Image (cartoon, grey):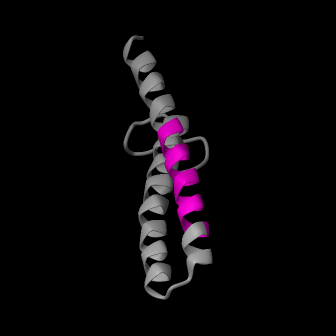
Amino acid sequence: MAATATSTPESGTKDKNYDLITVTHLCLEHVWRLDQYARDAEGDGDQELVTLFRKMQEHSRKGAEECKKLLARRLSEDSGN
């Protein structure tokens, strides 16, 4: 059965929490990828790209931390019901 916008994901997780988990994962993956890109730029001696990638990496890291805090709070609230 195909998932629709109004159906519950097969995991049984609420759509909004599933979305938050997905965004958290994507932010963390982005942090990892940007580290790889920054290392590549360092190897090529391109400090401008290193600086950009590290700045973007920090932004993604902060986003992941915000998502994790919000997710923890929401899951805690859900388990109290």
Question: In percent of the image, x 49 and y 61: which residue is there?
Answer: 30
Q: In the image, is residue 45 above or below residue 34?
A: below
Name the one closer to the observer, 41 or 11.
41
Residue 31 % position (x, y): 46, 59
Q: Quadrant of residue 43?
A: bottom left
Q: Residue at x 45, y 36 (%)?
A: 68
Where is 46 relative to 2, above or below? below
Q: Nearer the viewer, residue 14 or 74?
A: 74
At which x and y percent is residue 18? 48, 42
Magenta part, dominant SS: helix
Q: Quadrant of the N terminus?
A: bottom left
Give how far across and how far down residue 7 sits, in percent. 54, 42
Whether residue 41 can be seen here = yes
* Image: magenta residue range: 52-66
Tell me if residue 63 is in the magenta stretch: yes
Q: Is residue 16 above or below residue 59?
A: above
Residue found 51% across the figure and 38% down from its top: 67
Q: Quadrant of the C terminus?
A: top left
Q: Residue furthest bottom?
A: 44
